[in-house]
Amino acid sequence: KLTSVQRRKFAFTLNMGIIHIISSYNNTILTIKDRLKQVLFVTSTGVYGFKHTKKGTPFAAYTMASKVFQRITIKHAIILIQGPGTGNDAVLRVIYDMKIHIIYMRNLNKLPHNG
């Protein structure tokens, strides 16, 4: 029996894309957008067979990102990071390993400034 990931045929090349990483304590979600901010691909760690508390681990995020970036080729990227989870660093490690040129990186976490 084929899983939903094996049935889904996704492979494309982008010259410039936006990678949005949303990482919580329970899950990591990866969204890939084009230059016009249209969503091309969305995935999470649960799609790749991780269940319950294993979805929030860095290993699950690393596995998810490596499988995604094996099929999707991006030359230049803008990276937006959001959330306190541990999956952010794992996804960034895959991006560095795939030699994607980072144009801009921003952390979207909201920090209190005593008010």
Image (spheres, helix red, strand yellow):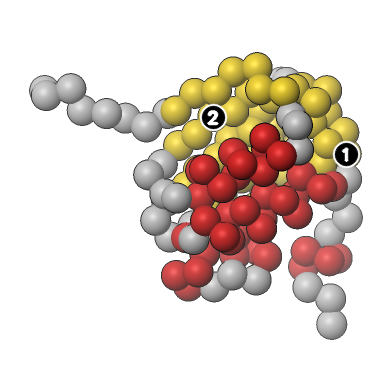
Look at label 2 and name its amino acid: Leu
Up/down of 8 relative to 89, above or below: below
Q: Distance between the residues labelled 1 and 2?
A: 21 Å
Given residues 55 and 1, the one toward you in this image is: 55
Tell me: 34 left or right of 14. Answer: left
Q: Report which quarter residue 8 is drawn in.
A: bottom right
Q: Which residue is under mark 2?
A: 80
Compare marks 1 and 2 and give the one earlier in the sequence.
1
Q: Which residue is under mark 1?
A: 12
Q: Position of residue 111 (x, y in %)?
A: 27, 28
Q: Residue at x 66, y 58 (%)?
A: 63
The crowding category of the residue bearing disc 2, from other C-alpha atoms within 10 Å (few below 14, some 14 to 19, many at least 20), is: some
Q: What element carries label 1?
A: strand
Q: Is residue 60 visible?
A: yes
Look at label 1 and name its amino acid: Phe
Q: Which residue is drawn at 37% across and 44% down?
A: 84
Tell me: 8 left or right of 42. Answer: right
